Image: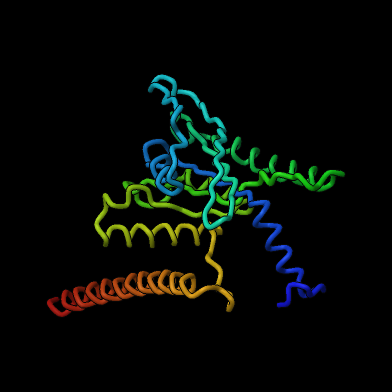
């Protein structure tokens, strides 16, 4: 497009330049019991140490509920695009002996951010608004159980309509590939049974770059393979049980 051209067709380019210059706000929440590798994953994702001054409580301090909400901020720049990352951590979640209603402070925090953003949007000075709403929640699931615990279900049910949830099987490398697939399917079945919505990756737009399209296609193909292998395994299991049942009846 001609640089001297002025018209509404140039608005997308102007908005793009303005957004890139200003940067973006992204708030990420991590939740799950202690010892699942949340800090390690976050430091690896963003190549920084956000937990230098982390204090680990003693075992005696975990007898009562000590859930707190902690914020950590860092600015990341990649390819000339700045992102103001705010990490919301929930130390103490699920660590006490009595975990009843321990997720309520998290729900209140998420709702307070919505209310604060609404007040800022309704005010007079809307140019310097900082978006503190929680955009995504990484929920870590223990790999040593048989799917979701009652605490996991209660937390996910309370926040699934307020934030995008991405379940993460922590320390999945401790499981065999078949065990990992079985645990994934078990969690999917539980989420469907409890009517809990999680984040679903959207379809690619036609104007996306080729690398992004390829990565998205590979991820969806892998998902279809996992679901197909699980269905095939169930068919084989039922076929073996049917053959054994018919063989026993024939012997009688």
Residue 145 lies left or right of residue 3; in this view the side is left
Q: Quadrant of the N terminus?
A: bottom right
What colour-coding does the image apply? rainbow
Residue at far top of view: 60
Q: Position of residue 155 (x, y in %)?
A: 54, 45
238 relative to 152, above or below = below
Q: Position of residue 144 (x, y in %)?
A: 31, 46
Tell me what residue is drawn at x 54 percent, y 35 percent: 102
Residue at far right of view: 124
235 relative to 78, above or below = below
Q: Position of residue 26 (x, y in %)?
A: 60, 49
Tell me what residue is drawn at x 31 percent, y 58 percent: 180
The one nearer the camera, 11 or 39, is 11
Tell me what residue is drawn at x 44 percent, y 61 percent: 188
Residue 166 lies left or right of residue 115; in this view the side is left
Residue 242, image quadrant? bottom left
Residue at far front of view: 4
The one nearer the camera, 204 or 229, is 204
Residue 49 lies left or right of residue 6; in this view the side is left
Q: Quadrant of the C terminus?
A: bottom left
Residue 104, image quadrant? top right
Residue 195 lies left or right of residue 189; in this view the side is right
Residue 39, image quadrant? top left
113 relative to 210, above or below = above
The one nearer the camera, 125 or 81, is 81
Q: How many marks?
A: 0
Q: Position of residue 199 (x, y in %)?
A: 54, 60
Tell me what residue is drawn at x 36 percent, y 69 percent: 226
């Amino acid at each position: 497009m001609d640089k001297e051209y002025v018209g509404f067709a140039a608005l997308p380019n102007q908005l793009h330049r303005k957004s890139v210059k200003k940067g973006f706000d992204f708030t990420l929440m991590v939740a799950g019991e202690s010892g699942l590798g949340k800090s390690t994953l976050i430091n690896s994702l963003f190549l920084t140490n956000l937990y230098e001054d982390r204090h680990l409580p003693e075992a005696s301090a975990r007898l009562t509920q000590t859930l707190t909400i902690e914020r950590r901020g860092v600015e990341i720049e990649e390819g000339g695009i700045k992102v103001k990352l705010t990490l919301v951590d929930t130390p103490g979640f699920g660590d006490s002996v009595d975990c009843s209603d321990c997720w309520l402070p998290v729900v209140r925090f998420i709702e307070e951010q919505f209310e604060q953003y609404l007040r800022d949007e309704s005010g007079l000075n809307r140019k310097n608004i900082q978006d503190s709403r929680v955009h995504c929640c990484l929920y870590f699931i223990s790999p040593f159980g048989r799917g979701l615990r009652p605490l996991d279900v209660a937390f996910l049910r309370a926040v699934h309509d307020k934030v995008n949830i991405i379940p993460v099987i922590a320390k999945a490398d401790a499981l065999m590939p078949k065990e990992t697939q079985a645990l994934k399917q078990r969690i999917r079945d539980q989420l469907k049974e409890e009517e809990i919505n999680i984040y679903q990756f959207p379809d690619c737009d036609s104007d996306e770059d080729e690398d992004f399209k390829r990565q998205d296609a590979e991820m969806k193909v892998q998902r279809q393979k996992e679901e197909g292998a699980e269905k095939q395994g169930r068919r084989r299991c039922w076929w073996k049980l049917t053959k054994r049942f018919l063989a026993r009846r024939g012997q009688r």
